[in-house]
Image: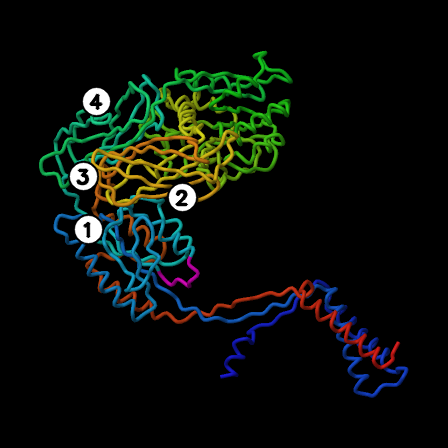
Amino acid sequence: MLYFALTAFIPDSFLIRISGLTFILIILFVLAVLFSFYVYRVTVPPLLKFKKILLFSIRTSILLIVVSLIFEPVVSLGYVKEIRAVNYLFIDNSLSMADDETGEKKLMTLEFAEEALKQESNSNLKVITFDATVNSAAGKDSFNLNFSGSNTNFASIFTYLEESKENIASVSIFSDGVMTAGSDPVFRAAKMKVPVFTVGVGDTIRKNDISVTNAVYSETMYLNSSADISVSVRNDGFKDITVPLTLFEENTPVQTINVNFSESETKQVIFNYTPKSEGEKKLSVFATPQKGEKTELNNRYPFFVTVLSNKIKIVLLAGSPGADISFITNSLQLDTNYTVSSFIQAGSKFLENKDPFKSIDSAEVLFLINFPGKNTPAELLNRVKSLISERNIPFFVLVTENTDILKLKVLEPDLPFTFSGSSQVSSETMPVLDEGIARNPIIRNNSNDVVKTWNNLPPVLRPNLEATARVESEVIARSKINNVSLNYPLIMSRKLGYKRSIAVLAGEIWRWKLKNPEKDSDLFDRFILNSAKWLNSGLEKKQFIVRTGKKIYAGGETIDFSAQLLDDSFEPVNDAQIKVNYFSATERGEIILNREGTGIYGGNVEGLKSGDYSFEASAIVDGKNSGADRGRFNIGDLNLELSDTHLNKEFLKSLSNQTGGKYYDYQQTALFFENLKQLSSRPVDNYLSKSEYTIWSNRWVLFLLIFLFCLEWFLRKREGLN
């Protein structure tokens, strides 16, 4: 037993590295030994032989250690560890897995899970459920399949696996492929280089159904100002029907449009909505149910908008004159809800002959064009930095060859990108939209094909700048030169907390208006106006803010509240009592939020019934009321899990094919488990774990050196040696 215990500490590999030449170290070792021999060859008074040997050994050890430390040695020890490969099997626990007319899909899932748990007990298989997140508990005792998940997030699987420290042999997913949350996981899955096997369950044949699948709208609207709401409505199975589609404000119909379908298809419908009062409004689009529909749960699409009454003050600062400034200003002035003040530098003065400081202090949105320029005063640049970083003023920045890059470094911590290089040279480039960006509100316009219109725009001038988008930034468009797409970000947005910003790394973007191949396109004007609206929708000027995680919750979901409290100096307050009262027509309750960070509080409520809810929050500090806020949310009007419960076989096949796995239909379950057994019999992998020890800076080596010096001194004194 002792032998086996000791062998666990014996390394499988041993290596010493030094920072100098080995032969020099050997020469110094030899000289150290010779010197020690010379010192103790003859002693006065004479010593016994064993005492000479002892002192010689101590002196030699001291010199060898000192010489070794000069060469900064590092010892590397390697231990071979055996790691058993793990096969993960994730089973979809969302609502869509139990929602079919016969209950057959739910039964199939339960039978599959039962067989999986049998195999788990006899192999290196881990069976786990997932919905919006992954249930980290694995094993038969903790397995819980109740089909209660309000969302299906496939990306959460790969987040879980990336954080796992285990040796993953394969990943298997049992699901209907209905993805209602998170990003497309195919790229992340392929990057892991682990085969993903998928088993699809459900019916691919779509039953007769009318569904409102999406609504594109501005979160912020203005009193008595019309706004377009683009709605997607889908027809499955019905032929030659007319479906009345109605826009509701609260419970009052605002506008009805008849949508004609000749066959199964998706159509876009535009509502023109003009709010008549300010505040938070619940809007919804409702498709009148048709006889023979599979379900009416997906006929309504609710959402919330905020209606503002005051005009928004936009200040445009330009480091030098240019055509882009005129075009951007003209676009902003198309919206009567904006008041635009421009300050354009020409040399050391401003063309407007006005002091910009008073105007920028009252700005609600900043547009920075060629700013800062080479003549921009430090005082103005620092004031802009203060507005952006301390007061969270949202901003649009256009970086061109005329932008002073050294001065721009002052604003870099708040920009959507980091950068290096010089901007004095530029090259022509065309924009190409990133994948999955087509529904981004910033790029919307009147084109039938938004992506195609953007990708066919004329070239603009890209500054000579090495730019990298920040992790929290969203790249909207990248650069394309000679029809080759580059990784260089051209347009990007950033939303971090209460900060919002948009950056365009290109000059002469006026070409997108005058030289646009589509003559009737409003792309340029809409891009500028959409940018201003998106920036303004993030404005948060209150010291006390309470929000729910989202506005629309599915039935059974947990309602999460978060709050931020700042004092009069806009510094976080950490010792407040935050109370939230929530109520609907039939239910009422209260929750005290707990501190979760610097000035940040949070809490959640479970088990609320479906309906429209309002909440009122108050903050108490030292017995005094320090703020109040209110808001709204809805439970149950929209459930993405029930809007489409058909098997998405194409998605599951793509996930498997891109990772070297395989797709199985439910009827091939037996074959799937047989192949899974073969994967489970994969031999144990060996893994070499290395540990490095820096000897020259190790305190125990220093203690040893001091001990040897003291020991030699003590022995010499005892024997009467000088």
Give the residue displayed 35% in from the left and 44% down from the top.
Answer: 182
Q: Residue furthest left?
A: 291
Give the percent coordinates (x, y) of residue 547: 37, 35
**Element type at marker 4?**
strand
Give the residue displayed 49% in from the left and 27% down from the top.
Answer: 393
Q: Quadrant for the C terminus, please.
A: bottom right
Question: Looking at the image, do the residues carrying marks 1 and 3 touch, with CB atoms under 8 Å apart?
Answer: no
Please state which of residues 506 and 619 is positioned toward the viewer in this rendering: 619
Q: Residue furthest front?
A: 623
Identify residue for label 3: 297
**Element type at marker 1?**
loop
Identify residue for label 2: 594
Q: Which of pointers 1 and 3 lies earlier in the amino acid sequence?
A: 1
Vertical arrangement, residue 200 with respect to residue 261, above or below: below
Q: Which mark is residue 98?
A: 1
- For the magenta stretch, what is the residue range? 164-170
Give the percent coordinates (x, y) of residue 414: 53, 34
Q: Is residue 453 magenta?
A: no
Question: Looking at the image, do the residues carrying marks 1 and 2 touch, with CB atoms under 8 Å apart?
Answer: no
* Residue 662 showing in the rendered view: yes
Q: Nearer the viewer, mark 2 or mark 4?
A: 2
Give the percent coordinates (x, y) of residue 489: 48, 36
Q: Which of pointers 2 and 4 lies earlier in the amino acid sequence?
A: 4
Q: Give me the C-alpha separation between circle 1 and circle 4.
A: 35 Å
Amino acid type of disc 2? Asn
Q: Which mark is residue 255?
A: 4
